[in-house]
Amino acid sequence: MPETHPKKDVGRPASNLPPLSLHIPEPRYRPGDTPDFGDIDIPAVEATPRPGEATKPDAMRELSYGLVRVLDFDGQAKGQWDPKLTPERLRIMLRYMMLVRAFDDRMFRAQRQGKTSFYMKCTGEEATSVASTMALDRGDMCFPSYRQQGILIARDYPLIQMMNQIYSNRGDHLLGRQLPIMYSAPEHGFFSVSGNLATQYPQAVGWAMASASKGDSRIATVWCGEGSSAEGDFHSALTFATVYNAPVIFNVVNNQWAISSFSGFAGSERTTFAARAVGYGIAGLRIDGNDPLAVYAATQWAADRARTNNGPTLIEHFTYRSEGHSTSDDPSAYRAADEATAWPLGDPIARLRQHLETLGEWDTERHEAQAKELDELVKTTQKQSEKLGILGHGMHQPFETMFEDVFEEMPWHLQEQCAQMLAEQEAKFGPNWKPE
């Protein structure tokens, strides 16, 4: 049969086309550079409309590209998104955020003193967890990443329990099985933290779908960093959420850095992270993550939307990671020294303090007194926790617990191993030996 199309020279480049090139994202500033964020578009507070909670996603696309704000830089709350919280509610929010920071500072020092192996601070990001949690019902389930200690603190979880888990001591109800800061408190609506990034996303959607299928009124909310939004689990979760209209809030905390990789490797050079909602046909909001009132208002809006069967919402918290990724990280090796101070959206605690002072509901004397009180509270609790053990001071849990809580019934080979180890332990330390 004759050929109808002439053969082409496969593999030979067309002479009139430039050679292909690969784009490698590169952060704008490296150590030694002077950062300048003057090109970040910060719209006026009043510029962003607040749609009704039942608005169709395709009618609110612009909210995925703008920036929801409430607190202006003069300390005033303005615009349609103002949640109009009482001064007392604002003071509670400020207290929680200050407590998170005091807790972080002391636990960071404890790691540097060799009392624990690892810690992660959330300095500058306190609003993304505290304000979000305060806008939810206590019965809603939170699926955190590893920088949302503010959820537990905003739900009045005992500080000593958090410290016991960090120290993996004999008061640790997780029996030393989790990496420090990977808490689990389902009774406080706090799902177990996983070190595998974005695995909590499909788990949150599954929990939300189960709540809906049972006719419950509780919703789920989940957090990840912007880097984790490049994981497959993130996209699988959004697919299920949009198909089944799951009552879930997706929080992407865009703090500009994923360990030493800047946000461009997750796609920030092309568009916003909130814009990912557009492709899935769900509501998307891009908000000032350093504005506690904007965080509260956006979460409240998304929660009301989910609770009235209007579907999921993706919220991008546009913020900045002021310190290193963790105690294992040295940010001076990969980013400009002055980036944190140059960040144009400021500090969430300072901004909420300014707002309260503008209202005449706070002052320097009360602020300094509260800071001192919270520091003493954390210090006292730390001493109590350290009496139950710290890193390197012996084994804090009964040896046999390492074999427990994995299987409903321990299989025979683990029973044999456990018995053998207990016999060796008794031979070495005596029959009455117990962990310190």
Image (tube, rainbow, N blue to C red):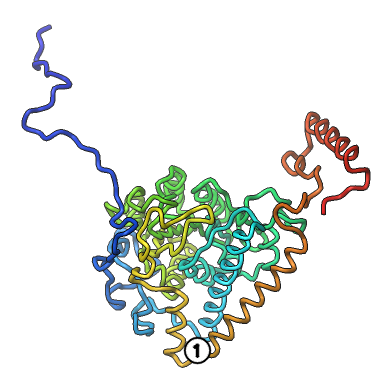
Check disc 1 and report its element: helix, strand or loop: helix
Image height of 413 relative to 422, above or below: above
- Please tell me which residue lies in front, 376 or 71: 376
Residue 301 occupies quadrant: bottom left
Judged left or right of residue 111, residue 81 is: left
Image height of 424 relative to 166, above or below: above
Badge 1 density bin: few <14, some 14–19, many ≥20, Cα 10 Å: few
Residue 416 occupies quadrant: top right
The quadrant in which the C terminus is found is bottom right
For badge 1, the amino acid type reads Thr
User: Horizontal and vertical percent for residue 208?
Assistant: 54, 54
Judged left or right of residue 240, residue 263 is: left
Outermost residue, left side: 16
Mark 1 sits on what residue? 364
- Please tell me which residue lies in front, 40 or 105: 105
Look at 51% across and 86% down and name the residue there: 87
User: Horizontal and vertical percent for residue 186?
Assistant: 65, 58
- Please tell me which residue lies in front, 161 or 112: 112
Look at 90% across and 37% down and name the residue there: 427
User: Horizontal and vertical percent for residue 386?
Assistant: 73, 63
Image height of 114 relative to 415, above or below: below
Judged left or right of residue 21, residue 372 is: right
Outermost residue, right side: 431
